[in-house]
Every structure is written in C-alpha cells, then in structure tokens.
Amino acid sequence: MNTKILILAIVVVTLFGAVYWFYPIKSQPVIGKYDDFAKCLASKNITMYGAVWCAHCQDQKNLFGDSFKYVSYIECPDDPQKCLNEGVTGYPTWVFPDGRKLIGEQGLEKLSQESDCPLPPK
C-alpha cells in the first residue's frame, strides 16, 4: 500500500511541476522601452515602408524591439501601389508627411532628430 501512495505522490508532484513549467503565471504586460517614441512617430504620420524579407528592415524593426508594433508600417509586397505612389525605391524607407524620405537603416537618434520625437532617457 505504501508503494502505491508513493507512486501516486510522485505522479501528482510531476504533473504539478509540468503544469507550472509549461503554463507559467502570466505577469503584467511589459511596456516597451520605445513605446512613447514609436507612438510619437505614428502620431506625426511618419511611416516606415519595407518588406519582410529585407534584412535591413528587420534590423530597423529590432531597434524598436516590442515597441515596433506602434510604428506606422507598410509592407510593400502586400501593397506595392502604395509604395510606388510614395516613391519608395529601397527598403527601409521612412516617409514624412512633408514628403521627406530617409532611405536605408536609420538610427533611433536620427529618427528622433528628424521627427522631433524624444527618445527615452538612457
């Protein structure tokens, strides 16, 4: 009888451990470091044009981390006419409402200078 109880206890502990390991308790959502910066760019109608297969676009997105979700972004292969209408000739291209374009990867500092959107303190 004691062996059956021991085996049952091991099984129960193992199941609880597996549940805890594979289904961790959800914590509060993490606020991205550049959320406010990305939201500022979007509020000023500054848009990044790119393509999912473009390595430079991926690098540009990675600079923002999780905050990129707030950036106004157009995937050119999905909407080529919109990109042609904006005069996009390379990826990534940042287009400003006044028609200015920044072509190629841009540092966050450069985007901040050109947009007057402040970066968070370091």
Image (cartoon, rainbow, N blue to C red):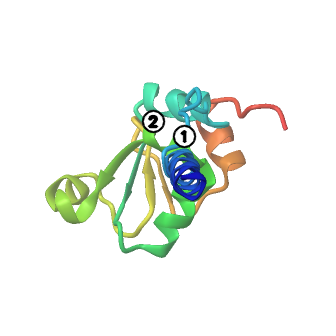
Query: Which residue corresponds to the image point at 68% horizontal and 39% vertical from the top-left?
Result: 113
Mark 2 closeness class: few <14, some 14–19, many ≥20 residues within 10 Å: some
**How far from the left and from the top, in percent, is residue 44?**
46, 27
Residue 95 coordinates in the image, percent (x, y): 41, 47
Counting labels gives 2
Is 81 placed left or right of 110 in the picture? left
Quarter of the picture holding the C terminus = top right
Where, by quadrant of the figure, is residue 45 drawn? top left
- Proximity of marks 2 and 1: CB atoms separated by less than 8 Å: yes
> In the visual, does 101 lie left or right of 84?
right
Q: Is residue 104 visible?
A: no
Task: Identify the residue at image location x=62%, y=40%.
Answer: 114
Amino acid beneath label 1: Ser
Looking at this rendering, what residue extends furthest in the front direction? 1
Say above or below: 36 vs 7: above
Instruction: Say which amino acid is labelled 2.
Output: Tyr
The secondary structure type at the circle numbered 2 is helix
Left or right? Give the position of 90 relative to 1.
Answer: left
* Distance Cα–Cα, label 2 vs label 1: 6 Å
x and y percent of residue 11 in the render? 51, 54
Mark carried by residue 81: none
Disc number placed over residue 70 in the picture, else none: 2
Q: Identify which residue, 25 or 85, lies in the foreground.
A: 25
Residue sitting at 56 percent across and 65 percent down?
59
Residue at 14% over, 58% down:
81
**Which residue matches tag 1?**
67
Viewer-side residue, 33 vs 4: 4
In the foreground, 63 or 32: 32
- Check disc 1 and report its element: helix, strand or loop: helix
Residue 115 showing in the rendered view: yes
